Image (tube, rainbow, N blue to C red):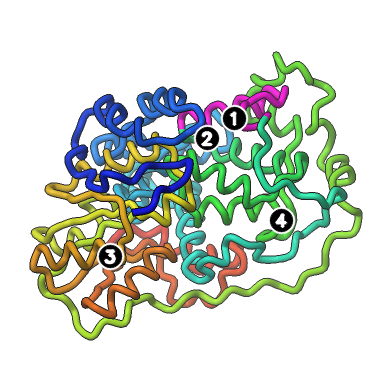
Amino acid sequence: MPMIESVWNPEPADLSPLVGSERDQLVAALAPRCHAADVQAEIDAALTTPAGGGRAASARLAAIDPVAYARSRNHVAGAVTGLSPWIRHGVLGLAEVRDAALARVATAEQAEKLIAELGWRDYWRQVHAALGERIHADIEPPASAPRAVARLEAVPDDVRAAATGMACIDDFVRRLQTTGWLHNHERMWLASWLVHVRGVRWQAGADWFLEHLLDGDPASNHLSWQWVAGTFAAKPYLFNRENLETFTTGVHCQTCPVVDHCDVEGSYDDLSARLFVSEPAVRPPLRIRPAAEWHPASQSIPSRPLVWLALDSASPRGPAAVAHPDAPRVHVIDLAWLQRERPTLKRIVFLLECLADVPGVEVCIGDPRIVIPERATAHGCDGVSLADTPCPLVRSAATEIATRLPVEVRPWPMFCDRSRVTDLGRFSRYWPQVKRSALEPTRK
């Protein structure tokens, strides 16, 4: 098994004995296998980030307040849910969160803002399923041409070290790298500054986020970066000091050494004039056809399947696990995923804590195209069952496995009715077509 340079030592491949360990034991066992530049920083972060798994998710879900969310969600100290890491790993489903939100309000309209944010996540997943690997390149030409055309291929060292001199940016960076989570506004501000001011290619910034975010998901992450960059949006996203102070009560600017002469001083018109040429790019309307329903080309449906728990269904509550409660379960930490996303120690710890809820789960590092058929044979299974996913790595592996074993794909509980959606080019066109169904609770 090859070494993944500068990220993770994959040997020994079997992590099953670690599943269910206490956080400090997990960190102690995994830290020597982490090849980060600052291993102690990784250890400190992994010891203090939120706990993975169903108990923590249930506590967070019980605390949501849709009315307060609608009123204050844009403020960094607002009543946001913080549920995204558990949604990303399939510990919570979109329909489940929607139902919990509706149960806490008198009318569906009071929960609409929160459910619309779930709608964005659903939309990103549909776009990812439709475009696959193409989300890693510009979906459209930039909406506005930058004055400085040079693009940095990596996040600069002073940014990663939180040493830019801008109090807001340095604070966002520190918390990204130590907690694995940022408010959505902070993510957009940091992304906007990196792309439009520092001239970093959006792909480099998006990949950096995926190293650290506990909710790191290429669909939501990369497509949001494209929205900021203006390569999947009608215009690039900019932020200025006024916007920052409005939604943070000015906490950063009070002590910032570059206050009154920083990179984001001025109106939006001022910033646009400084950063972009005056003529916006002319682009044809973007149309993206939804993907056809995905099913690997299997010859039959397994009757005794192995349940493959992918990264977005690392839970006993995914549809494949629920459909086959007595089937053996396997999660493969994909070597290709390790190489592509370069996950930090805190991400691996959070994942293993989510998997600890799965009785008898086997966890290993390897190539799922090899490991899944091997484990199916070892358990006497006649096929594989997995939850639907937009992930190209999983889809490709499942399609290859299906040439040897039957593979079934189980759908998640319905969040919204997409049967009439014919275009995913813009969320503003998508959401009106599915909103009514998304605001309805799951039918029992």
Q: Position of residue 127 (x, y in %)?
A: 52, 66
Q: What is the C-alpha distance between the residues marked 3 and 4?
A: 40 Å
Q: What is the C-alpha distance between the residues marked 1 and 3?
A: 40 Å
Sequence-first tag of 2 and 1: 1
Report crowding for label 4: few under 14, some 14 to 19, many 20 or more residues within 10 A (C-alpha).
Answer: many
Residue 68 in view in this figure: no
Q: What is the C-alpha distance between the residues marked 1 and 4?
A: 22 Å
Asked if 299 appears above or below 91 in the picture, the reply is below
Residue tagged 1:
172
In depth, the one of 366 and 107 nearer the eye is 366
The amino acid type found where label 4 is placed reads: Gly
Q: Which mark is residue 370?
A: 3
Rendered image quadrant of residue 31: top left
Q: What is the C-alpha distance between the residues marked 4 and 2?
A: 21 Å
Left or right position of 308 against 165: left
Q: Position of residue 9 (x, y in %)?
A: 36, 42
Report crowding for label 2: few under 14, some 14 to 19, many 20 or more residues within 10 A (C-alpha).
Answer: some
Which residue occupies 77% across, 70% down? 283
Q: Position of residue 97 (x, y in %)?
A: 35, 49
Proximity of marks 4 and 2: CB atoms separated by less than 8 Å:
no
Rendered image quadrant of residue 171: top right
Proximity of marks 2 and 1: CB atoms separated by less than 8 Å:
yes
Highlighted range, magenta: 158-179
Residue tagged 2:
182
Q: Secondary structure at mark 1?
A: helix
